[in-house]
Image (cartoon, rainbow, N blue to C red):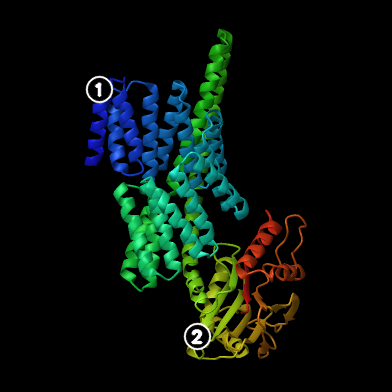
Amino acid sequence: MFKVFLFLLTLLFFSSIYGEENSSIKIKLKVAAKLVTTDVDSANILIGEILKSKEIKQTEYIAYAHAIKGQVYFSKGNYQEALQESQLAIELSYNANSDSIIEKCAILISDIFIIQKDFNKAIYYLEKSLDIAKKINDNNTWGKYHYTYSSYLLDFGDTTKAKEELNNALQSYMKSSNLTGIALVYNQMGMILFANGIYTEANKKFLYARSYALKNRNLKTLTKIYNNIGLCAWNLNKLDTAIYYFKKAIDIANKVGIKNTLPPCYLNLSGVYEEQGKWAEALEKYKQYHNLNDSIFSIEQVRLVKAISEKYENQKKENEIQNLQWQRNITIASIILALFIAAFVWRQNRIVNAQKREVEAQKLIVERKSKETTDSINYALHLQKAILPQHNQIKKHYKNYFIYYQPKDIVAGDFYWFYPSPNNPNKYYLAAADCTGHGVPGAMVSVVCANALNRTVKDLQIIEPGKILDNVANLIIETFEKSESQVKDGMDISMCLIDTETLQMQWAGANNNLLIIRNNELIEIKADKQPVAVYENRELFTTQIIQLQKDDCVYLFTDGYADQFGQITGKKLMRKNFYKILQQASSLPCIKQYDVVAETMHNWKGTQEQVDDMCVIGLKIG
């Protein structure tokens, strides 16, 4: 802060030499704008002094000061105050004919609504800024528009178009030499790769982003990037590196005073400590995450942001109506009539407002209950992820594979299972399982089934897939027999044991078949027609031995992909068409096969609701 004031004093000295009117205020505003990205608390102090100063008289400078104050509140996670300050700045800027301030404030308001997941309003305000950008040919705003639109597309799962928009944003930011914008684009590109499990490539994008953020000394953006680098390190099993970057992100955010980037950093740090078995540290960081997250993203704050926005829009409309009435010289008769109407409306408003308050009270209760339910389900997701194998664990044993895993809801009844053979380092088990139901009930059954698989192989050391399923069925039946009501839940599964040295595969299936594609020909291995659960006339599961060949493609899957309804036809995809998709993709590397499977389903499903969990595992034998 001392260096900042030295810099400020130097600029003020030179401005006094040239005697520019209001030059000291202009310089202070520029310094405050720069401080928002490096020292939020100092920016807040300086902008407070500017607004109290008697020197500030021009409407344009007052508007700019409120715009900067809006950015300060945004960085601190106080979105309703940020919205109020930005809308005040816009109103003042209209009077001062300052398009550039209106443009900046409209962009900030769009960011607030992106965080609130209200993309319609976000795009509305961004298009307002675009109208100005077209006049002054501002590439920065075009870049921001493309970047925001990519976030909108990603929220709806359209990865392909989102990538196109990110490339457009990158070109615009490059033209204007906007280093912060370039850093944000590379960061978003890295997040797309990260979401697909391509951690090494994602990390490269994050490092690109870091280099541009460092050039511009944009500490706010750096906190997000360091958090993402930490996520990559975590998934690559570099736990100490992950802790270093999460702590670095937290230190910078606290130093700069940026509150809204802290919650994910604390949550991720808690997860790494949990994986290391440091339970006290994990619990402490999770509490910090929970308390901070509730204060920033509380239901009350979301409601206030929406209320302020609606109040602002309504006020603008009322002002426009009053101006039109003044210009048309309303007669005394119309005024009298208006008074009668106003009296009637006032009476009606009292009735409507009373009803509205009652509805809003009920809505708040429902929203609070909904948040509690969603928080519980999100924590259930955290627990369910613990039973799913990490990609870095699988890659230690086999690299040329892909897993397409798409739950219908937050948590799933489908799961995939991987376990290295305890008796032979060249062998490993792999399975795709579909438990009864989906959502929370399905997830609960999946935990029971996954634990039964682990216990059978690890503790009881049963080796043969068919016998494993026999024992798992017994364990599941034993677990659910404790219930007072008869529970017939269990799972369908396709499970194999592969020897990477001899290329021999042992396989067993319960209602889920196995598909092998060899030289572009389909080989379908039928499963036993019974579930791993309570079943009348249950028989022992069959273990089939298959000799694989180099370049064979092996596919394990559940029925969710083939059972999905299409937007255009309104019919299920069906297994025959599912096999054709895999057949056409089988000549590609597995990472490209994943893209084919994912994009084909996205195009097929369209806006149709997903009907079931989906899990498809592909292996290319080397």
Q: Which mark is residue 455?
A: 2
Instruction: In this rendered view, identify the residue nearer to me: 336 or 169.
Output: 169
In the figure, is residue 86 to the left or right of 613?
Answer: left
Percent position of residue 400, x then y:
58, 74
Secondary structure, mark 2, is helix
Q: Please report the residue visible at 42 percent of the width from the left and 54 percent of the height from the top.
A: 225
Quadrant where the C terminus sits is bottom right
Residue 362 in sight from this viewpoint: no
Instruction: In this rendered view, identify the residue nearer to me: 39 or 189.
Output: 189
Q: Please report the residue visible at 51 percent of the width from the left and 51 percent of the height from the top.
A: 366
Q: Measured along the vertical axis of the image, is residue 309 above or below residue 168?
A: above
In the figure, is residue 572 to the left or right of 101?
Answer: right
Q: Measured along the vertical axis of the image, is residue 357 above or below residue 511?
A: above
In the figure, is residue 414 to the left or right of 291?
Answer: right
Residue 61 in sight from this viewpoint: yes
Quadrant where the N terminus sits is top left
In the figure, is residue 402 to the left or right of 70?
Answer: right
Question: Which residue is the site of mark 1?
Answer: 17
| Spatial separation of the CA atoms under disc 1 and disc 2 | 81 Å
The kind of residue on which mark 2 rests is Arg
In front: label 1 or label 2: 1
Secondary structure, mark 1, is helix
